[in-house]
Image: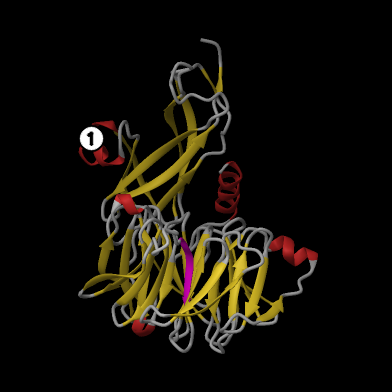
């Protein structure tokens, strides 16, 4: 988090944010909510015709349709064993591939019948996708490895990469295969999305790190469709961006906030036939549709602090310099920041605890100070080396609520 905040500031300070002409729009269609007892959503898969799958932490794999939902793969089988599906993909023949906890890759028909399965050598944080020729690619992070298999598990070999290239790919966490077989790898540690040939030759960058439209900071999930679109879900900027196969930026959707047009804690995206796009956010599975209409522009804000270590007495307030930037394509007017006392929902009815910032032009940043309370030594959750997270909520006319996050590591003085 501390390194990420420094990188944010450096990127934002060296490049002003630009406007982009959107050429397509992502529109909300419907959503399905999971129960708290089921945990979160670990993966999503768009099947087309309004159908999609979602891997639920304690709920197995659920199939959603416009007419309801049913269990595709139960969380607990007849023997009492639990199944955790970490990622999913579909092959060119319509069969489905699941990576299950423990490094098992299982291939299913769409009626739920198991075809075959095999074991991965390394399975730390796996991501799976299938190329148009049926080759199965599995990316793992510990260490970085990209293995290739035939449809039934025959090993086809691993990429032979130089030490420099392997270092650049460390902590890569997202994978997608384009329609021409191009392999896309996203790295949310350095904010890059790289393109490779099927045999591992580096083609170049699809997206560079940054805040501008067409740049990424935390590419947590990648997806492609048969129409030649590439989708990049950025978990840190809470937005979904669309590119063409040749790397041209098409448009962006979403920002940090509430509702079906925004994201707060999404991680995954999948694209299916007919412009279907499925994403998850805060235990909700949402279906969107890619259309030829232009995406409406809106202000979108985020923030950071570089002042990580501030001297503070236990239980006292400390002033922390905080920078807010509007990385959207329109001016944000009537901007305010609010510090929550209990939860973010109380802010909707607590204007008296908010302060005005004025307006922020597209690409403009503004620096101010927020008051953050240091922990007390007698707090039950107190830890001498723990950090203090704080959230600044920006409310601008026409943009709704957006969220900027900060963190400090207070050096606590004497009582």
In percent of the image, x 42 and y 28: which residue is there?
371
Residue 400 vertical placement versus 86 (above, below)? above
Residue 300 image position (x, y, % from top left):
38, 55
Q: Is residue 403 magenta?
A: no
Q: Residue furthest right?
A: 163
Q: Residue furthest front?
A: 79
Residue 325 vertical placement versus 96 (above, below)? above
**Residue range of the region highlighted in magenta in the rendering:** 84-89
Q: Nearer the viewer, residue 71 or 91?
A: 71
Q: Is residue 84 visible?
A: yes
In percent of the image, x 20 and y 75: which residue is there?
67
In percent of the image, x 62 and y 64: which residue is there?
140
Residue 113 vertical placement versus 395 (above, below)? below
Q: Is residue 85 magenta?
A: yes
Would residue 35 be found to the left or right of residue 360 on screen?
left
Would residue 307 be found to the left or right of residue 240 on screen?
right
The overriding secondary structure of the stretch rendered in magenta is: strand
Residue 194 image position (x, y, % from top left):
62, 71
Q: Nearer the viewer, residue 158 or 196?
A: 158
Q: Is residue 230 visible?
A: no
In percent of the image, x 66 and y 58: which residue is there?
142
């Amino acid at each position: 988090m501390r390194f990420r905040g420094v990188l944010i500031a450096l990127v934002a300070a060296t490049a002003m944010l630009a406007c982009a002409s959107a050429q397509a729009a992502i529109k909300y269609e419907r959503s399905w909510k999971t129960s708290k007892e089921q945990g979160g959503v670990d993966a999503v898969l768009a099947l087309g015709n309004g159908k999609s799958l979602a891997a639920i932490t304690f709920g197995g794999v659920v199939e959603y349709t416009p007419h309801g939902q049913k269990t595709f793969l139960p969380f607990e089988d007849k023997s009492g064993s639990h199944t955790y599906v970490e990622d999913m993909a579909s092959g060119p023949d319509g069969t489905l591939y699941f990576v299950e906890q423990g490094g098992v890759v299982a291939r299913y028909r769409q009626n739920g019948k198991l075809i075959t399965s095999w074991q991965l050598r390394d399975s730390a944080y796996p991501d799976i996708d299938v190329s148009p020729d049926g080759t199965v690619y599995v990316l793992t992070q510990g260490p970085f490895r990209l293995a290739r298999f035939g449809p039934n598990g025959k090993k086809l070999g691993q990429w032979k990469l130089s030490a420099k290239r392997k270092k650049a790919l460390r902590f890569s966490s997202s994978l997608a295969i384009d329609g021409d077989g191009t392999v896309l790898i996203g790295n949310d540690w350095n904010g890059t999305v790289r393109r490779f040939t099927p045999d591992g030759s580096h083609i170049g960058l699809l997206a560079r790190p940054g805040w501008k439209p067409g740049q990424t900071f935390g590419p947590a999930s990648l997806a492609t469709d048969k129409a030649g679109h590439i989708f990049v879900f950025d978990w840190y900027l809470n937005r979904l961006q669309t590119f063409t196969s040749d790397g041209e930026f098409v448009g962006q959707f979403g920002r940090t906030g509430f509702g079906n047009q925004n994201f707060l804690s999404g991680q995954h995206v999948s694209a299916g036939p007919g412009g279907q796009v499925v994403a998850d956010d805060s235990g909700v599975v949402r279906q969107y549709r890619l259309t030829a209409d232009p995406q409406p522009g809106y202000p979108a804000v985020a923030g950071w602090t570089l002042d990580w270590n501030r001297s503070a007495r236990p239980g006292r307030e400390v002033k922390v310099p905080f920078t807010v930037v509007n990385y959207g394509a329109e001016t944000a007017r009537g901007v305010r920041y609010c510090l929550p006392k209990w939860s973010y929902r109380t802010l909707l009815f607590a204007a008296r605890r908010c302060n005005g910032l004025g307006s922020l032009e597209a690409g403009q940043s503004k620096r101010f100070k927020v008051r953050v309370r240091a922990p007390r030594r007698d707090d039950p959750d107190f830890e001498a080396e723990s950090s203090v997270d704080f959230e600044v909520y920006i409310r601008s006319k026409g943009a709704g609520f957006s969220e900027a996050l900060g963190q400090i590591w207070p050096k606590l003085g004497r009582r």
